[in-house]
């Protein structure tokens, strides 16, 4: 057991090693998988992640999948019927990467993880809290105090990239015959761009995303749903149910709305939080009920008539 000095860094110990009453006075960083507790003692992370932690990991896991689907749809368009198979393959890649990531993390071989609880934003950025006890020597305390929420996402992105490079090129080459040779691999090229971006985003803004992701989900899902319904010229329930694809998009956004609401409420009080899920269809219903009053052609015609 190592006793730590009073420090704002959650991963730094400095004191004496309690072995036969001897003292070495050495300072250092807690080993990976440990962090200091209230008594400033390095303790092994043995707790299970909270619901909010799992929701955060789920959000970070959904980002590459949603981007895969977006670029597959963007570059396939109506030219090829292979988009569905590529969507399924992307889902399999991300699912397999998630399972393997859980298996290789501690405890190895189990679909579970042990973690340290996140207490404050500074836990994500220990490198910014290196203390200088004598104002001369700096004690470096860069350590994963939020183990494993920081590195597990990076490991997951690495496995996603590996599985994509193993499976997707072969699939696209076989079934994407409706696309030109220069177009069929564009969704893969796009992934080679957004994976480094996601990695940097996690490395730099992981702590900010941890606290902000529920609101990001709600805002983005509302904006994208409005843009999609506007671009598809959906102005009534009849237009909405005219194509199965529109219903799939609608239900997908509803799932995201529910995910965001659950993440914000954390379901601390079920009797108060569960009724909030009734708000999920609200934005879509509001859009359908008010779309006819905001149609540009109608506004222009009424303006020309002097109304």
Image (cartoon, rainbow, N blue to C red):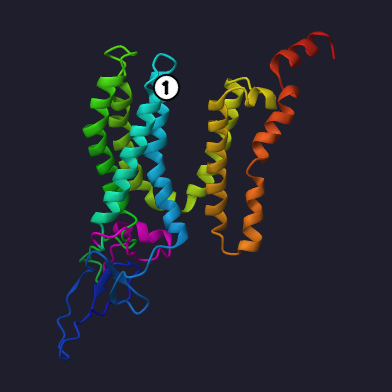
- Which quadrant of the rendered structure holds the C terminus? top right
Where residue 191 appears, x then y in whole percent?
31, 31
Residue in front for this viewpoint, 179 or 19: 179
Q: Residue at 35% x, 42% y: name it.
A: 201
Instruction: Name the residue at the top extreme.
Output: 304
The magenta stretch is 108-133
Q: Position of residue 19 (x, y in %)?
A: 16, 87
Up-down relation of residue 26 to residue 22 (above or below): above
Image quarter for residue 176?
top left
Confirm whether the magenta stretch covers residue 63.
Answer: no
Whether residue 185 appears in this view of the structure is: no
Q: Is residue 133 above or below residue 225?
A: below
Query: Relative to 258, is 69 on the left or the right?
Result: left
Q: Is residue 301 positioned above or below 233 on the image?
A: above
Q: Residue at x 33, y 33 (%)?
A: 89
Total labels: the figure holds 1
Point out residue 189 in the picture as x, y percentages from the top left corner: 28, 25
Q: Is residue 171 left or right of residue 123?
A: left
Q: Residue at x 37, y 77 (%)?
A: 38
Of residues 18 and 168, which is closer to you in this image?
168
Mark 1, Cα crowd under 10 Å, few <14 / some 14-19 / many 20+, is few
Under circle 1, the secondary element is helix
Q: Which of the 4 image quadrants contains residue 254?
A: top right
Q: Is residue 32 visible?
A: yes
Residue 33 in percent (x, y) is at 26, 65
């Amino acid at each position: 057991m190592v006793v730590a000095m009073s420090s704002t860094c959650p991963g730094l110990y400095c004191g004496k090693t309690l072995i036969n009453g001897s003292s070495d006075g050495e300072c250092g960083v807690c080993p990976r998988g440990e962090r200091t507790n209230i008594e400033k003692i390095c303790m092994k992370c043995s707790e299970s992640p909270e619901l909010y932690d799992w929701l955060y990991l789920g959000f970070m896991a959904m980002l590459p999948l949603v981007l895969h689907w977006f670029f597959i749809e963007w570059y396939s368009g109506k030219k090829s019927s292979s988009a569905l198979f590529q969507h399924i393959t992307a889902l399999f890649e991300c699912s397999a990467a998630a399972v393997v990531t859980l298996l290789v993390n501690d405890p190895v071989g189990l679909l579970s993880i042990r973690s340290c609880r996140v207490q404050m934003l500074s836990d994500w950025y220990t490198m910014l809290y290196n203390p200088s006890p004598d104002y001369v020597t700096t004690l470096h305390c860069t350590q994963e105090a939020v183990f494993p929420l920081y590195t597990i996402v990076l490991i997951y992105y690495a496995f996603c990239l590996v599985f994509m490079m193993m499976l997707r090129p072969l699939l696209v080459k076989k079934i994407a015959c409706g696309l030109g040779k220069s177009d069929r691999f564009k969704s893969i090229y796009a992934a080679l761009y957004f994976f480094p971006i996601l990695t940097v985003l996690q490395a730099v803004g992981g702590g900010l995303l941890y606290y902000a992701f529920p609101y990001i989900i709600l805002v983005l899902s509302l904006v994208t749903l409005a843009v999609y319904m506007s671009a598809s010229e959906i102005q009534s329930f009849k237009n909405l149910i005219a194509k199965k694809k529109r219903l799939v998009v609608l239900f997908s956004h509803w799932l995201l709305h529910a995910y965001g609401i659950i993440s914000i409420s954390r379901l601390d009080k079920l009797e108060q939080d569960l009724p909030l899920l009734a708000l999920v269809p609200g934005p879509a219903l509001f859009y359908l009920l008010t779309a006819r009053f905001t149609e540009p052609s109608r506004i222009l015609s009424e303006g020309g008539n002097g109304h």
